[in-house]
Amino acid sequence: MLIERRVAESDGVSSAEGHETWALSYIDLLLLMVTLFVLLLSFQQKQVSEPVVDKEAQSKQDASDLLPEQTFLDQSYLSGLKGKVSVVQEQNTIKLAMSDSILFLPADAALSLSGEQILDELAVMLKHRPWHILVEGHTDNQAISTPRYLSNWELSSARASSVTRYLISKGIQPQRLSAIGYADTRPLQSNQTEQGRRKNRRVALVLRMPD
């Protein structure tokens, strides 16, 4: 009898320990589930609290934070135009200047073959950028008087218009372009020497971000 009682007591203890172990495992599982729930809830609240970013607006902001040459100048194109196109940054603009001897026939506003080739390469960059493009025509101070061009004002304006029309034909939107002729009023160098006059005879593309 004593032996049977001890066996029964032993079975009772084992049963109690088994129940206690099962209860602890169940509590651990509940704690794990609660922890996961709290983590998921916290992650969801973080996503909701974060502001929705307009990707287009963000890209524009990123572009505006860059320097002008970073948003436009593509060295892979300009490297092939070295010695033909000069690049000057002035405040919020970039100026691309080209000699009249490369762009035009002598004393004329008709584009030469080399002029068309240069504008073709520039147009590839320009038509995919948002810049406004002001085409400036410049001459030296040597008087000109022909049946077609009565003065340097007419010649510089005609050359600026010729470049503008060509860029439009290459896919640049007309509303992004404007043209003006300055004649000899904005020289780069003195007109007292041939070298200076050659520098002053040019067409410049002034690139500016739209307002």
Image: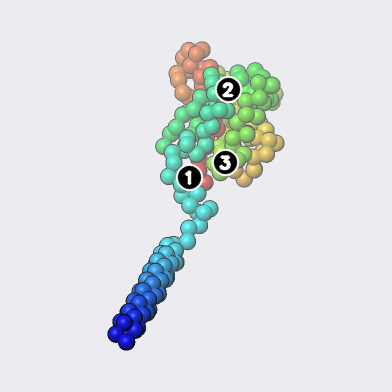
Q: At 48% across and 45% down in the image, what residue appears?
A: 63
- Element marked by disc 2: helix
In the displayed structure image, the side of residue 153 where residue 146 appears, left or right:
right
The residue labelled by disc 2 is: 80
> Which label's residue is closer to the chain start, 1 or 2?
1
- Element marked by disc 3: loop
CA gap, disc 1 to disc 2?
25 Å
Q: Is residue 16 visible?
A: no
Residue at the bottom extreme, as displayed: 1
46, above or below 186, in the image: below
159, above or below 59, in the image: above
Query: What number of labels is visible?
Result: 3
Q: Amino acid at mark 3?
A: Arg
Q: Which mark is residue 129?
A: 3
CA gap, disc 1 to disc 3?
11 Å
Q: Which mark is residue 63?
A: 1
Q: Amino acid at mark 2?
A: Gly
Q: Quadrant of residue 78?
A: top right
> Which label's residue is closer to the chain start, 1 or 3?
1
> Which label's residue is closer to the chain start, 3 or 2?
2
Q: Are marks 3 and 2 in contact (CB under 8 Å)?
A: no
Q: Quadrant of residue 155?
A: top right
Location of the N terminus by quadrant is: bottom left
Q: Decide: few, some or many residues near mark 1? Use Cα within 10 Å; few <14, some 14-19, many ≥20.
A: some
- Element marked by disc 1: helix
Q: At 37% across and 76% down in the image, what residue appears?
A: 18
Q: Amino acid at mark 1?
A: Ala
